[in-house]
Image (cartoon, rainbow, N blue to C red):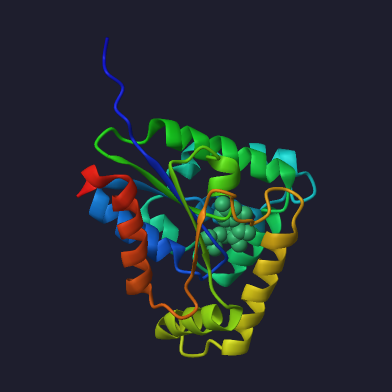
Amino acid sequence: MKKKIFRPIITIDGPAASGKGTIAKSVSKDFNLFYLETGIFYRLIGKFYLVSSNKRNIKKFLNSIRKESFLITKNDKQELYNEDVAEKASFLAKSKEVRSFVLTKQLEMLMHYPKEFNGVILEGRDCGTVIVPNADIKFFLTANLEIRAKRRHQQLIVKDKKIIYDDVLMDLKVRDYNDTTRKNSPLVKAKDAIEIDCSSKDIKETIIIVKKFILSKLPYFK
Ligand code: C5P
C-alpha cells in the first residue's frame, strides 16, 4: 500500500490590510507550500456580481458562474484588486449561499493541490475556524485600524497618486464591520490560533516570527 505523506496545513486569518497576504506568500515560497488566497474567491464573485442581471436571485447568479472561472491566474488577479470589487466582495461574503458556494470551491482546491508542494498555507478571515478547523498551525494577525489604513494608503498611492487616506480608512472600517459582525463565519480568532499584533512590527519582523514558529513545530522544513 502507498504510504500517505503528511502535508501540513497552516492558516493565517486577520482583518483587511493586516499583512497576511504578504506573509503567506513569503512563507509559501520559503517552505514550498501551496498558497491559497481565500479572499480571491469572494473578489471573483464580486466582479461577476457587478455586471450580473441576476442580482435579485443569488442562487441563479451563483449557478451562472462557470467552473473554469475559479482557475484564477496571476493576470486575472490584477483586475480583482480594485475598490469596487472589494466592496462587493465584502457585501456578498455576508450571504450564507455565497459562503457555502465558496467553501465548496476552497475545499476542492485543498484536496487537489499539486503533489510537488510540502503542504498548504491559506489566508483569509475564516481559514482556521471554518475552512480547516483542524489545521496544524493557525495564526491570527491583528493591527490597529489607523496603522493598517496608513500602510494600505502607502501601497495604493504608488499606483494612483489621487488616493485619499480618509477614503482608505473608511473602506477598511466598513470591511472590518462587515467581517466581524456578520452572522455567517465572522472574523474571529480560533481558540488554538497564535495571535500576533503587528501594530508596532514591520512586515519583515512579523514574517520572521511566523517562520520561527512554523520551524519550531515542523523542524524538517529547515
Ligand atoms: O482578503 P481580501 O481583502 O482579498 O478579501 C476580500 C473580501 O472577502 C473581504 O473583505 C472579506 O469580506 C471576504 N473574505 C471572507 N472570508 C475569507 C476571505 C475573504 O469573508 N476567508
Along the line of sight, which residue is nearer the eye, 17 or 141? 141
The number of numbered badges drawn on the structure is 0
The correct choice, above or below, for 188 with respect to 220 in the image is below
Q: Position of residue 174 (x, y in %)?
A: 69, 71
Q: Which of the 4 image quadrants contains residue 25?
A: bottom left
Task: Looking at this view, name the residue that lies furthest to the right.
Answer: 56
Q: Position of residue 137 (x, y in %)?
A: 43, 47
Task: Looking at this view, name the residue that lies furthest to the top.
Answer: 1
Along the line of sight, which residue is nearer the eye, 59 or 39? 39
| 92 sits to left or right of 221 | right
Q: Quadrant of ligand 1?
A: bottom right
The correct choice, above or below, for 219 with respect to 116 in the image is below
Task: Looking at this view, name the residue that lies furthest to the left.
Answer: 222
Q: Which of the 4 image quadrants contains residue 49?
A: bottom right
Task: Looking at this view, name the residue that lies furthest to the front.
Answer: 216
- Residue drawn at 42 percent across, 56 percent down: 76
Q: Does residue 64 appear in the picture of this structure?
A: no
- Residue drawn at 59 percent across, 50 percent down: 190
- Residue drawn at 72 percent across, 50 percent down: 53
Q: Does residue 73 appear in the picture of this structure?
A: yes
| 96 sits to left or right of 35 | right
| 165 sits to left or right of 123 | right
Along the line of sight, which residue is nearer the eye, 12 or 25? 12
The correct choice, above or below, for 129 with respect to 114 in the image is below
The correct choice, above or below, for 212 with respect to 56 in the image is below
| 137 sits to left or right of 82 | left
